[in-house]
Amino acid sequence: MLNNLKVFLRLLAGYKKQLYLAILIGSIAGIGTGAVLTKGVERLFSLILSGDRDLSASEILLVASSFPTIFLLIGLCVFGSAYLLNHAGLAAIRDLRDKVFAHLQLLPLSYFQSSKTGDLISRLTADIQAMQQTLTFVARNVITQPATILGAIYYLYDVASKNEGVYQIYLCLIALPIVIFPIRHFSHKVERKAREQQEELGGMTNTISQNLSAAREVRAFNLQDKERLQFSRRIAELFKAQMKVIKYSFSIGPVVELCSSIGLSIAFLIGYYNGVEGGVFTAIFLALYFTYTAVKKLGTFSAELHKGVASYLRVQEILDTRITVKDPDQPLPLESVEGEIEFRDVSFSYGEVNALEAVNARIQKGDICALVGPSGAGKSTFANLVPRFYDVSHGGVFLDGRDIRRFRANDLRNHIAIVSQDPVLFDESILENIRLGRQDATDEEVREAARQAFADEFISDPENCPQGYETIVGERGARLSGGQKQRIAIARAFLRQAPILILDEATSALDSESETKIQQALGKLVAGKTVLIIAHRFSAIKNATRILVFDDGAIIDTGSHTELYARCDLYRNLYDRQNV
């Protein structure tokens, strides 16, 4: 348990002042409960059971008012300690959630390709929420319960030193060490089952995420029953995992209570036959009860702690994931870019799968370079290495003669504009979605970029966009057509005014009329810029000044359309297949 407690103490390391003050106040509350309250009970019951009624009114009032005073002080200390610990705990959870999210922003794209989105969401929400619940429970018990035990034991020692025959009563305390064994057993079970529960919860969240993001496909292929069945299986497995956690968590209390009741029964028998005074025995009985109750709560506390640690380990797995694309310790300044790109003996692999092998290529400033080849040949990987979405396994990518790993990633990407095949729009206005291309752009600059991308036509149409540029596009642009989303993404590229442009099937979602307009606009946009066009449709590369032909992770040929059609069989086959 101590090792698990250290995990949460490390989380609270940034809030030591609050932690120390909470420990002090909580200790006062616990000792007040275990020692002061029991002493007050002893005095009260001794007076009542003795039959002495000779006390003055002021003495009676003093005895009667002592209990509200004691409970008021204990209550204030319990509140203060719990408040401070919860404040520190919630602040630590806030910091952890912020740290995990920030870490996710720096992880390579390969991490997200191998991780389930729903599971990541679950770790950021459900697992951290479970940790918050653990911290809240810890805040209520971690200080006051041990202090209560210490206070009660001090009182028991004090009363035993003044009354004969009392020491024998403490034989009932032998039940305490026995309780430790089932607490340890059930706590370890809880940790293992809690981790399984959180994994099942992550799986369920991922199932929901996939279903909601593919609502159209589910209906188009009549997958509703299949999805319902899969979800039912998921929640059934989650239910089983949750019940196992509950079974082991709630097994601790009855075991401790049984041992406690046996111990208290022994205390009663010994006290009765030893003739211990009624008031003293009542207080001893109460002190023993406080001790057993505190042990019971610590047992539950141990189980909660194990559940929290199980969630923490899942969150920590994200933080332990290595950031592979790192900024250099002494980055080179990158204020202006000419746009010459060179690949020198570049190899790259996704895990064990080779994507590029010993690739060499030099793209001059102002080249419109098309990347063609069959699916999986390495075109997208080649383009993704330019903005350092990944770092090469071997060799280097150079920009204007300098290795791009010597620049800060943000500085590098500020000089690159990307239009992907499946553009992502955020649930904001059209104006703000275009402004993502350059966040300091004015509204007029945004509108001009939209006009250049032929997006202004539908944005200004009240039937399409009732609020014009202030129209909210919905999650992932759900309220827009594919062609409209594509034109907004192209407008971002116009707005960015970057010297390097990467187009990944940028016109694939446009109708022929819009594509013609976009091709005209691109003719102006690419002037003086270095452009990489990832294309499966040869109509998209008719303006290319140079073509790289990829196959099985290698560049097998390069040249103009006429040159490649004459000598490259793969290029000719790909071209003829689309122009039969």
Image (spheres, rainbow, N blue to C red):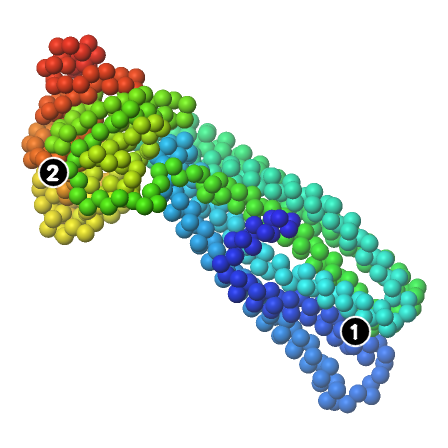
Tell me which residue sits at (57%, 65%) in the image. Answer: 20
Q: Residues within 10 Å of mark 2 (few under 14, many from 20)?
A: many
On the image, the x and y values in percent for residue 69 come to 65, 78
In the image, residue 335 lies at what x, y percent? 19, 46
* Disc number for residue 181: none
Left or right side of 486 for 278: right
**From the viewer's perspective, is residue 31 above or below residue 253?**
below
Q: In the rendered image, which residue does mark 2 sit on?
A: 453
From the image, state whether disc 1 or disc 2 is nearer to you: 2
Q: Position of residue 323 (x, y in %)?
A: 40, 39
Disc with the residue nearer the chain's start (1 vs 2): 1
Please name the residue shown 25% across and 23% down the image.
360
Q: Nearer the viewer, residue 417 or 390?
A: 390
**Residue sitting at x 84%, y 83%:** 52
In this rendering, position of residue 340 left or right of residue 355: left
Residue 564 shows in the view: yes
The answer to which quarter of the image holds residue 30 is bottom right
The image quarter containing residue 192 is top right
Query: Residue 15 location in percent, x, y?
Result: 50, 61
Q: Residue at x 20, y 31 (%)?
A: 341
Which residue, given by chain and number where applicable, does mark 1 sit on?
42
The three-letter amino acid code for the residue at tag 1 is Glu
Callout 2, which amino acid? Ala
